[in-house]
Every structure is written in C-alpha cells, then in structure tokens.
Image (cartoon, helix red, strand yellow):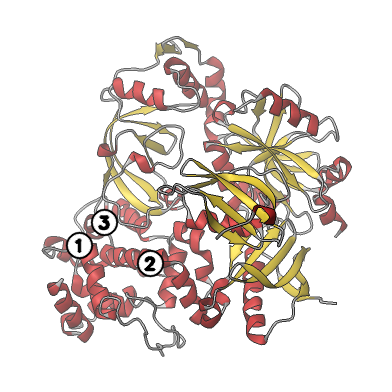
C-alpha cells in the first residue's frame, strides 16, 4: 500500500526516487541538452514504455515479451513534444513532455503488449518524459515544437530493475548497421561514394504481395490517401508481416508491382531528408523519389506505396480460390482468415487451388455484391429491419439468447467477430463480455457495430465459400464449420429451407 | 436552453468545433455545459451538458467527431480522467426516461454516476488498492438500479484489470 501511494508522489522527488530504486521498467533513456539525470532527485530522464509490479512481475517474464519487440529510439526531429501537467492523487503537479509522432505511436503499441502486467490501469497511457519543474519551464519558454528543438535525445531501450540495466534493446537494423553507420558518409548527393538516389532498374523492381490492416468498417476496394491517419511518409502503409498488419486493423492483401527504394538505416533516412528537405514530414522525400522514378520505399518489412493506384487490393474470390480450409484455423490457431489465406498461398506456392475451392471461382454468380448479399440477409432475417424482435435460440451454444437487429446477429457471433478483429476489439471490447439484454442495449447504443459485424461476417463467409449466395445463406444459419461439414457430407444445401429463402430474396434484390 | 449570466460561475476554453471556439461553462448549480457554434449555426448554443466536465467532454467527442479538445488549465480540465459509458446495464425503462450510467476514473479513484437528464442522481465511489477495486460509498438506490450499478462496477473492474471487487461501505 505504501509502495503504491508513493507511486503517485511523482513530484515528491524523494518518493519517486525510492520507487525507481525498486521498480522494474522498460523504457528509453533520454538526455536533455546533454544532461542525463534530473537535478531534483538524481533519477535518469527516460521515456517509460511500461512500469512493472516488482511483487508479481519478473525481469525474465518482461524480457520474454520485450525481446520480441523492435525498440526504435524516437527520432527527435520527427517527434513533437507537448508540455503538460498531470495531478497525482495528492494534488501534486507532475511535469511532463508528452510525445507525439510515429515513434511515440510505436511506444504506445509496445505498452499495450504488456497490458496484462504491471499495476491496474490508473491512467490512460501517453508516451511522455517526466521532468523537473525548472527544465519543464525552460522548454515551455523556448517554445520548442520537437524533441530536437528541446535538445532531447533518445537512446537504446533498456530493461531496468532499480538502477541496474538488465537488458539493452538495440534497434534491429542498428545491430547490423552500427559499423556501416560509422562508415556511411553522406556528401551531398552520394552515400558511401555511391549515388544517394540511384536510377531505378532491375535491382529495384519488385512484384510483391503485401499486408495492410484497415480500420475502415466498410469494404475497401481501393485506397485513398485522404484517409491516411498517421505516418512520416505519405502513402499506403503495408508490410510483409501479416501478423503486424492485423494488429492495425482488418487484414487485407495488397499486390504491388514497381520500383522500391530501400532505406537501409536511420542514417540513410537522415541523408535523404537532408537532401530533399521537408521539415517535420517526409513529403519532400516522397516527391523527390517519385520524380526519380520510384513507386515506394521499404524500411525493413514495411513498404510504403506512394500512389494508391499501385496498391491493388486483392479481391476475396482470389483469396478463397487459393485457400485450403483447415480445421485448425477455425479453432483459432491462426488469428484471422487473411493470415490463413496467405499461409495457404505460401504453402501452395500460389499454384492452382483445390477443386472444392475452385468451383465458385470458376462459376461466379452473376450480379453478386456484398451489399446485395447483406440486403438479402436482412430481408430474410427481419423483412428488411421491420421485425427485429427475434425469438430466444435454445441451442446449447446460444443459451437462450436472442438474435439482434435486422441481420439476426446472434450474441455469440457478435462476441466472436469483435474478438477476431483488432480494430473492433479496440473500439468495442465491452461487447466481448456482454450477454442477453445487456448485449442488446449495447448494440442499440452502437449502431455502427451491427453493420460492421454483419459486413465482416459476410466477408468471412465469402472468403470461405466464395460469392455464392446459397453457401453464404447456409453458413449464416449453420456457421462456417457447419457448412464445411455439410459440404463434406455432400448434403443437399440448395434444397435447405433457409437457402431457398435466401435464393428467392437474392433474385428479388 | 437560455442561461442567465448570473447563473454562470466559471467559463473556460474547452476546444474548437469546425474551427469555432467551444467554451465550458459551470453553473452555480453545478452543471457543466459546453457551448459553441457548430457549422451552419450563427448563434452559440448548448452542445452538451453533464454533472461532470469529463462526462461533457466525453459526450462532445462522441456527438461531434470534429470537436478538438484543448488542454484545459483549471480544475475543470479533467484531462487525465477516463470516462466510460455503462448505460447498457440500465433497464429499457430507465434508458427511455433519460437515465445514463457513467464511470469516471481519475488516477486510482473511480466514481460511478447515474444521471437523469444529465443531472446526477445516484453515485458510488471506489478506489483501486493493490489489485482490488474497493467501493467505499454508495447512494441509497432501489434494487434494479443497484443491479445496474453492479454491472458497471464489474465492467470497470475488468477494464482496470482488478482481480476482485469489494464493498466496504461504513
């Protein structure tokens, strides 16, 4: 209790010092105008990623997770600062510099990886550096906008227990490029005596299948840079890491063909920035590389495509045609179906699909669209939203709960769909725990969620069974596993009563 | 809503909406109101109201996606408050009659408020101590409201990763 109380006496420098001497922390050491420690309590300046509970967390457990993360020290020139103040529970002022920008977002992302550890969430986590009052005031008076303007530098992340550094985490490229960086010399238009911007050629041409995670709740056919939420360079952000993409939103596969400029290291990026100029963003670098004939840049496994017309979203029937349905995927071994599809493509080497999946690819239904399918389902389930007072479902998995809304979404389906999509889970996490009338009221309060769940589930069924209203209609009632079982047993799906209703409604729509 | 100047005890800048300033007023009666001029309106109007500035800001951000809150300086700032809506635990009748249920977390303290037409009617107050959420104060309320409150407290405790909820009302 005493320990926890002192946690909040952060502007009680002595209390803060005692806390730091016991605590376990992952964070980036910071220096401010060459000074590494606070003048008031001798604690090193740092930007904490996560503070742990030494009574229940151990450095080994922390390192198990931290060792798998990429800790890139924030680039001070690209990190904006916002002086602020928190109040601790005793009313003491805590002086902080809040951090904003791409690397600050990464810090937030890393913090979320440790959400099951540490103390119960007392504050909404914001990346920041705590400073003494005098330093804070100096920075406010200087009107510094970026960490660089304020004389702030970030150093390699560390896992510390008290004053002891247990582990240090070098940024991955930096490990390999440390010597390279020492020898890399930027002189105007050259880097290491090679042209800084070589002409695109065979060496730079790529044909790639990349992953993108979208937060859009609606089907996405093409990208529009107006919807870009963040990122130093303007463009469509993709990655070769499917898991990473799914952490940013609903996963999508994107095909790219063109010239990629590889940024080898932070020093290389710095050289480009100096060459093209551009202040606090990468716009001028992108414009310059575009003028040189490049269509995108790569940084490790991240690929940023400049022009949306070069980022072609792969349609769902192309995904379904290449997938091998595996029971283990349905059981949650893989987080999302797009990842599964990509793995299947990788295993099959993008070779011709199994006969079962290829049937619908060979015989696509004319005049099919996801919107039309949703309208059809709405017509069948509730006469287009007129009759939404659904009966209780007495099957064991539904435990007497009632379906909701115009699409007849079962609470079990709502819970599962929200869990399966990180963007929905981020926004509607409560829905994963609610049941019965509480779930119904939550859905009433969040109408966008009903539409999002319906669209994602149709998309999932299309992914498995293609744009086939009969199979989708059967799947809407019997689930994905139930539909595969029926197909395997060669059941007469077309004659099923629900499928007949779907077919009739589909033809009328 | 017409607000007499004499009823206003405090005014502070709350942010902008469609590039137009938004102010947070506190009335002598303890109600907080955001006023501003949304796009298409020539006159200032009340945009959101509530019994706590954090609730008002929460509702502003929900109702007006273009609302940009500013860093507020005084005790009205509640910049570090975490507001959550738990109204789905209220019965249909209570919801239809204008009741809402919120939690406001400030550091280790959490308060739960049942409001009727934005005026606080009932509350419960708790603190996180160790890994327990301890409720130390609850207004007298009827059993159906108590059940809703229990749902909200449990939901909040889960979000805060507390391992148990205790009621220690003296």
Q: Which mark is first along the chain, 2 or 3?
A: 3
What SS does tag 3 mark? helix
Give the vertical position of A4 relative to A481 (above or below). Answer: above
| Chain to which mark 3 belongs | A
Residue, disc 3 = A319
Residue that label 1 marks: A369
Foreground disc of the pair 3, 2 = 2
Depicted A35 relative to depicted A191: above or below? below
Q: Residue at x 40, y 41 (%)?
A: A228
User: Percent from the top left, x then y, of residue A429?
Assistant: 52, 64
Q: Secondary structure at mark 1?
A: loop
Q: Residue at x 20, y 66 (%)?
A: A372
Residue A352 position, x and y percent, is 19, 55
- Which residue shows up at 86% across the image and 43% down it? A12
User: Contact (CB < 8 A) between labels 3 and 1?
Assistant: no
Mark 1 belongs to chain: A
Q: Is residue A297 left or right of residue A483?
A: right
For the C terminus of chain A, the image quarter is: bottom left
Q: Position of residue A349 (x, y in %)?
A: 26, 50
> What is the number of the mark on residue A453?
2
Mark 1 nearby-residue class (10 Å; few <14, some 14–19, many ≥20): few
């Amino acid at each position: 209790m005493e320990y926890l109380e002192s946690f909040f006496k952060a502007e009680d420098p002595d209390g803060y010092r005692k806390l730091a001497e016991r605590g376990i922390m992952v964070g980036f050491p910071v220096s401010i105008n060459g000074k590494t420690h606070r003048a008031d309590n001798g604690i090193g300046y740092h930007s904490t990623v996560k503070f742990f509970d030494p009574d229940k967390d151990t450095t080994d457990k922390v390192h198990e997770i931290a060792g798998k993360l990429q800790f890139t020290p924030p680039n001070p020139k690209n990190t904006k600062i916002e002086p602020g103040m928190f109040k601790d529970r005793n009313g003491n002022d805590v002086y902080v510099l809040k951090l904003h920008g791409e690397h600050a977002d990464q810090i937030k992302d890393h913090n979320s990886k440790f959400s099951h550890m540490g103390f119960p969430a007392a504050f909404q986590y914001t990346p920041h550096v705590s400073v003494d009052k005098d330093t804070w005031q100096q920075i406010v008076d200087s009107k510094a906008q970026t960490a660089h303007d304020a004389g702030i530098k970030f150093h390699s992340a560390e896992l510390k227990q008290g004053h002891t550094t247990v582990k240090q985490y070098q940024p991955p490229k930096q490990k390999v490029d440390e010597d390279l960086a020492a020898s890399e010399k930027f002189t105007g238009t050259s880097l290491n005596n090679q042209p800084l911007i070589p002409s695109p050629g065979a060496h730079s041409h790529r044909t790639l299948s990349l992953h993108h995670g979208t937060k859009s709740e609606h089907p996405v056919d093409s990208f529009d840079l107006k919807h870009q939420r963040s990122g130093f360079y303007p463009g469509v952000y993709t990655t070769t890491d499917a898991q990473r993409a799914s952490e940013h939103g609903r996963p999508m596969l994107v095909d790219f063909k063109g010239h990629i400029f590889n940024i080898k290291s932070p020093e290389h990026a710095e050289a480009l920035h100096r060459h093209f100029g551009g202040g606090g963003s990468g716009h001028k670098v992108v414009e310059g590389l575009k003028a040189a004939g490049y269509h995108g840049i790569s940084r490790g496994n991240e690929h940023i495509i400049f022009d949306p017309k070069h980022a072609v979203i792969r349609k769902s029937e192309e995904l379904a045609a290449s997938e091998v349905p595996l029971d283990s995927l349905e059981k949650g071994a893989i987080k999302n179906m797009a990842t599964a599809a990509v793995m299947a493509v990788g295993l099959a080497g993008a070779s011709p699909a199994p006969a079962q999946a290829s049937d619908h690819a060979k015989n696509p239904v004319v005049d099919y669209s996801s919107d039309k399918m949703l309208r059809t389902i709405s017509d069948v389930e509730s006469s287009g939203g007129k009759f939404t007072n659904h009966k209780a479902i007495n099957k064991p998995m539904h435990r007497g709960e009632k379906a909701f809304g115009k699409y007849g979404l079962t609470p079990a389906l709502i819970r599962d769909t929200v869990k399966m999509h990180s963007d929905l889970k981020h926004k509607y996490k409560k829905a994963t725990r609610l049941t019965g009338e509480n779930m119904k009221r939550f859905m009433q309060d969040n109408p966008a969620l009903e539409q999002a769940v319906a669209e994602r589930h149709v998309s999932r069924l299309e992914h498995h069974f293609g744009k086939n209203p009969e199979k989708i209609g059967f799947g809407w009632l019997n689930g994905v596993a139930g539909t595969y079982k029926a197909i395997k047993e060669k059941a007469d799906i077309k004659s099923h009563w629900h499928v007949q209703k779907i077919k009739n409604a589909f033809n009328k729509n | 809503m017409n607000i007499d100047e004499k009823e206003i005890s405090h005014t502070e800048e709350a942010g902008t909406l469609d590039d137009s300033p938004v102010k947070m007023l506190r009335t002598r009666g303890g109600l907080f109101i955001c006023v501003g001029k949304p796009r298409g309106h020539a006159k200032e109007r009340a945009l959101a109201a509530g019994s706590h500035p954090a609730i008002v800001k929460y509702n502003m951000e929900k109702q007006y996606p273009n609302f940009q809150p500013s860093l507020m300086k005084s005790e009205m700032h509640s910049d570090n408050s975490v507001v959550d809506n738990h109204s789905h635990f209220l019965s249909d009748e209570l919801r239809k009659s204008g009741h809402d249920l919120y939690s406001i977390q400030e550091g280790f303290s959490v308060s739960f408020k049942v409001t009727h037409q934005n005026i606080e009617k009932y509350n419960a107050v708790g603190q996180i101590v160790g890994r327990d959420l301890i409720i130390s104060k609850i207004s007298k309320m009827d059993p159906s409201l108590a059940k809703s409150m229990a749902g909200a407290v449990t939901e909040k405790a889960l979000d805060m990763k507390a391992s148990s909820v205790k009621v220690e009302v003296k």
